[in-house]
Image: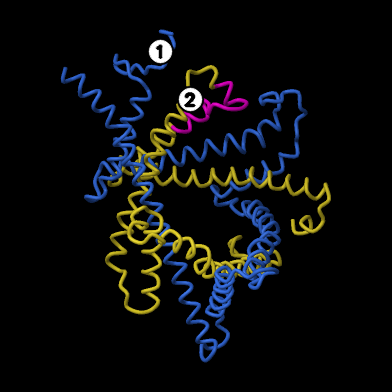
Chain colours: A yellow, B blue
Amino acid sequence: MIVQFFVPHAVGTQGYELLLQWARIVGAFALVLGIGSLFRTHWDKIRRRRPQYGYSAVTLLSFGLMVWAGIVYGTGEGGLGQRLTEMQNGTAFEWLFDNVQVPLDATMFSLLAFFIASAAYRTFRARNVEATLLLVTAVIVMLGRVPIGEMIYEKMPEVYEWIMQYPAVAGKRGILFGVALGSIATSLRIILGIERSHLGG
Amino acid sequence: MADAEQSSQLIILGLSLNPQVVGLWLQAALTFAILSFLIGDNPVYKFAEHLFVGISAGYGVVIVWKQAVLPLLIFKLLPQLGPKPDELADYWVLIPGLLGLMMLARFIPRYDWLSRYPIAFTVGLFMGAGIPAVVQMNLLQQAQATMKPVLGLGSIEWGLALSCLVVLVGVICTLTYFYFSRPHEGVLGVTSKIGIWFLMVAFGAGFGNTVMARMSLLIGRVEFLLYEWMPIVSVHLSKYVQ
């Protein structure tokens, strides 16, 4: 994989793409492992009638419903899915996605707005220079993205833009360099067989 | 026309329901179920939470089936089932298929060592592909973007030049904060202190952005309730009132 980056020959590029496709196939089986673990945990809870096992039944039934709607009933485009959809009337999968998954997902994450605001109110205190910088930047960024910020100070959106483009980038880039160097070092350790923890060794 | 209208209706317990209207009511009910957590953990929230886990896991399986298993494995082995029935079968995909099956050996304790081969394959592949990409994108390009010409070639834009200097100084100072081979004293102490300030600005900006992203999601849900669900409620209520 490293060699093909430096030798852009057709054989190398095709081999690279082929291996990436193979990785996606292997990854699909890895998903089976994850789903198997989820299924085993919840099935065990139901079988042993553990407290609140009814919720586990909800998880397994909704999982089964989504898989049935998507795979058996068809997802609406391409090959087998399309042919199955044509035999049926509409796609239950899309209906479930739009009316169950999307609102649940959006509301679940919007809940965090309350908890982050509450946590910030309780913990944000301008005790020293560092905490003050964090607090002031967070307030400017929040106000810079909404019309009320511009009403308070007309150049607030510009200040927000400048913070995001320069000092915030500097801090993030410093972290990114560290992450990049760390991931290269770890990759080399794995390739050279020094690091084997991923194999359980 | 009448047939088409009839086919777009869901018949449940003799009641003819429009799937779109049912969907809107379901969305509203689930939104309220999740928001009910604000008054404390309760069975309605727990139901919605477990429903979310099941539906999301199912969604993931369907997407992987549709985008990886069907086109990359099944249709290549059995082209007659796919969109190109005239193509020849590609038996090379049996190799990743076999590696994938070896991954499932984790379920059988006696043979779980077999799963090390697909793990080694995947890890090796992504490490190999990752090193050049990380060096290029996260090191070289980032370093290049940090060292922008401050004076420029023609006229000098002092505001821009100063901003570029802020980035350069900020990155160097942040890096010195992460340099632990020497004690943070003297010049290193000063630069690492400035590095912490830049880190705080970055964390504050990240925090502010996260809060506002969650806020926009919340506004989206409130807008849905006010402008999509409430009109349906008022139509239904007016029917009953009449």
Q: Which residue is mark 1?
A: B5
Residue found at the far left of this picture: B241
Residue B189, how many percent across, how many down?
50, 87
Residue A129, how many percent across, how many down?
38, 79
Q: Which residue is mark 2?
A: A91
Does residue A42 belong to the magenta stretch? no
Residue A51, how many percent across, how many down?
27, 47
Residue found at the far bottom of this picture: B186
- Total marks shown come to 2
Q: Which part of the image, by quadrant, shows the N terminus of chain B?
A: top left
Whole-number angstrom distance, CA of label 2 to CA of label 1: 16 Å
User: Is residue A8 depicted above or below A132 in this figure?
Assistant: above
Q: Mark 2 vs mark 1: give the one in front.
A: 1
Does residue A72 belong to the magenta stretch? yes
Would residue B65 appear left or right of A37 to someone viewing this image?
right
Q: Main secondary structure of the magenta part?
A: helix
Mark 1 neighbour class, 10 Å CA radius: few under 14, some 14 to 19, many 20 or more? few
Residue found at the far front of this picture: B155
Give the magenta range: A66-84
Of the pair A84 and B188, the residue shown nearer to us: B188
Residue pictured at 59% horizontal, 64% vertical: A197
Q: Secondary structure at mark 2?
A: loop
Residue pictured at 63% horizontal, 72% vertical: B150
Would residue A11 appear left or right of B62 to someone viewing this image?
right
Q: Label 1 is placed on what type of residue? A: Glu
Residue pictured at 38% horizontal, 48% vertical: B216
Say if residue A47 shows up in the picture. no
Residue B115, how many percent across, how many down?
61, 51
